[in-house]
Image (tube, helix red, strand yellow):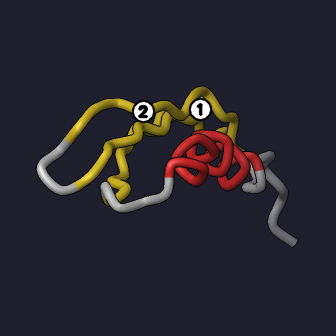
Amino acid sequence: MTERRVVFSIGVVYQTEYEILKKTADMLRKVVDDQHYVRFDRAHFKGYAEFALIFEIVYYVLSPPIRPHT
C-alpha cells in the first residue's frame, strides 16, 4: 500500500468570528501541508452541529521511503 486516506471532522464553536471562519479551511490545509509524508485533498465546511460548525478534512498518508537498517 502506498497511501492511506484519512477523513476527520472538527467543530468550530458558533461564537467564532466570521473573519476567522473564512480562513478556517486554509488554516487546516496549512497544518496538513506542513507535515511529512502527507498529501492534502480537501478541507471544507460540512454542516451544522448542535454546538459547532463542522469542517471536514481529507488527506492521504504516504508511505515513507524505506531505509535499510544499519
- Residue found at the very far bottom of the displayed protein: 70
Q: Position of residue 5 (x, y in %)?
A: 48, 32
Report which residue position mark 2 lands on. Answer: 45
Say whether disc 1 or disc 2 marks the residue closer to the N-terminus: 1
Q: Name the residue beneath numbered marker 1.
A: 3
The three-letter code of the residue at mark 1 reads Glu
Evaluate whether residue 47 shows in this view: yes
Q: CA distance from mark 1 to mark 2?
A: 25 Å
Q: Secondary structure at mark 1?
A: strand
Across and down, in percent, residue 31 comes to 67, 55
Which residue type carries mark 2? Phe
- Does residue 56 lie above or below 67 as drawn? above
For mark 2, does the 10 Å Cα neighbourhood hold few (<14), some (14 to 19), or many (20 or more) residues?
Answer: some
Relative horizontal placement of residue 59, taking residue 15 as reference (left or right): right
Q: Position of residue 60 (x, y in %)?
A: 58, 35
In depth, the one of 58 and 27 nearer the eye is 27
Q: Which of the two residues, 29 or 62, is positioned nearer the viewer here?
A: 29
How many C-alpha atoms fall within 10 Å of the one at disc 1: few (<14), some, or many (≥20)? some
The C terminus, quarter of image: bottom right
Q: Residue at x 57, y 28 (%)?
A: 42
